[in-house]
Image (tube, rainbow, N blue to C red):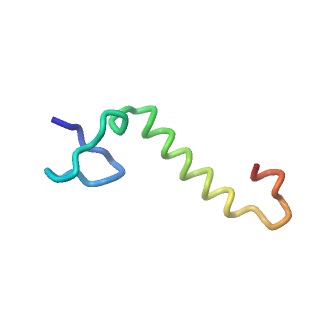
């Protein structure tokens, strides 16, 4: 039986994949969301920082 993923609801029609249950995968997704949020706040002209 699949473990529930905090990112998407689990229903009988939508099973979670093995990699979605890994703590490191969930942490990487959280880091990605944080990084994208921070990069969007950078002022124009800071392309070197966003790379």
Residue furthest bottom as drawn: 44
Q: Quadrant of residue 22?
A: top left
Q: Is residue 48 above or below residue 40?
A: above
| Residue located 48% across and 45% down the image | 29
| Residue located 36% across and 51% down the image | 7
Q: Is residue 20 left or right of residue 15?
A: right
Q: Is residue 43 left or right of residue 15?
A: right
Q: Is residue 10 left or right of residue 40?
A: left
| Residue located 76% across and 49% down the image | 51
Q: Position of residue 27 (x, y in %)?
A: 47, 38
Q: Is residue 1 left or right of residue 30?
A: left
Q: Quadrant of the N terminus?
A: top left
Count of number-bearing discs: 0
| Residue located 40% across and 33% down the image | 23
Q: Is residue 19 above or below residue 16?
A: above
Q: Position of residue 3 (x, y in %)?
A: 23, 38
Q: In this rendered view, identify the residue nearer to me: 42 or 1.
A: 1
Q: Quadrant of residue 9?
A: bottom left
């Amino acid at each position: 039986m699949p473990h529930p993923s905090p990112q998407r609801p689990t229903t009988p029609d939508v099973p979670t994949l093995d990699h979605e249950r890994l703590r490191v995968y969930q942490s990487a997704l959280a880091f990605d969301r944080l990084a994208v949020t921070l990069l969007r706040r950078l002022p124009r002209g800071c392309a070197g920082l966003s790379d």
